Image (cartoon, grey):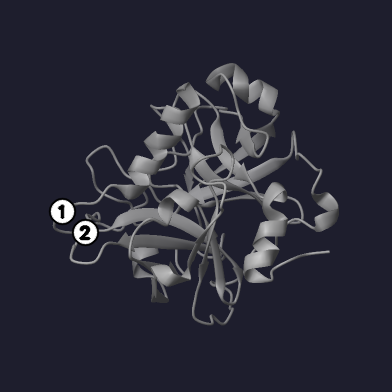
Amino acid sequence: MKLFLLILFLAAACAHRNRNRTRIPKDDDPKDIIVNGYAAYEGKAPYIVGLLLRTDGSNGAAVGGGSIIANTWVLTAAHCLTTDSVDINYGSNRAWDGQFKHNVRKENFFRHPGYPNTAGHDIGLIRTPYVSFNNLVNKVALPKFSQQSQRFENWWCVACGWGGMADGNLAKWLQCMDVQVISNDECARSYGSVASTDMCTRQTDGKSVCGGDSGGPLVTHDNPMQVGVITFASVTCKSGPSGYTRVTDHLDWIREKSGVAYY
């Protein structure tokens, strides 16, 4: 039950909408969004996109993240794909002021069939217009099918995203954190239970994902590839591991829906 509440916490943050507008800071200074993270340099994560999830008839928007995995596909969390359309913002650490953006309707949203009834399947895909790659917009590789049994325990990774601040505004500048993958047994000591298809990173020096980072990527430092999708955190974002949907356990589904696969 505790883990369920934690997942809903981050989901609610992704789904929260200001009734009249999306609130964005007026200044351009980097903010401490991912807890105890650091401001990314421009082009550090060309695969990350900022998502504004929109409901028809509303001027507000939900906030989330995603990753480019092919010229026409973005990977994100399933719980971020519950609205009518999404603005996908590409190509800058200033998520809402990037090189360009596309609006995509819900007919192009694909949520894993195991979500939301089965834990560990909070993963989704967005089919997009064709996007050309450059130094600020590029795809991230997925693990190979030969790595499906790899748990990546003790591997060092980077997680990046834009999330909400204490004053209720949203950040413009990308924040990242370097974290180490831990075993699900270690993660379960904090949360009671963790699905085998989830994974966690250790909270070292207070580093954690937080509300609004949902859907963003967890990418290995060595031979960069995306191994996780940000989905949950402790209620305060300061008292437990960060949680992700495990990409290796969903490679078959990703290939079935998008055709993206590595061998």
Residue type (three-letter) at the residue carrying disc 2? Gly
Residue 208 placed where, x, y %?
A: 49, 34
Q: Residue furthest left?
A: 20
Figure quadrant of the C terminus: bottom right
Residue at 52% in and 45% down: 230
Q: Is residue 126 above or below residue 224?
A: below
Check contact, mark 2 vs mark 1: CB within 8 A: yes
Residue neighbourhood size for the residue with mark 2, other residues' Cα within 10 Å, grouped as few (<14), some (14–19), many (≥20): some
Residue that carries the numbered disc 2 in the rendered image: 60
Q: Is residue 41 above or below residue 188?
A: below
Determine if residue 94 is in view: no
Q: How many residues crowd around disc 1 within 10 Å: few (fewer than 14), some, or many (20 or more)?
A: few
| Frontmost residue, 83 versus 138 | 83
Q: Which numbered circle lies on residue 75?
A: none
Residue 216 at x, y percent in the picture: 51, 52
Report whether 111 appears left or right of 50. right
The spot of residue 86 in percent (x, y) is: 37, 66
Amino acid type at mark 1: Arg
Residue at image position (54%, 21%) is: 191
Total count of labels: 2
Find residue 210 and report its horizontal and vertical position in percent.
Answer: 42, 38
Which element is circle 1 on? loop
Asked where in the image residue 73 lies, by quadrant, the reply is bottom right
Q: Disc 2 or 1, which lies upstream in sequence?
A: 1
**Figure check: 61 above or below 15:** below
Q: Measure how far apart labels 2 and 1 are at the Cα level.
A: 5 Å
Identify the residue position indicated by label 1 in the image. Answer: 19
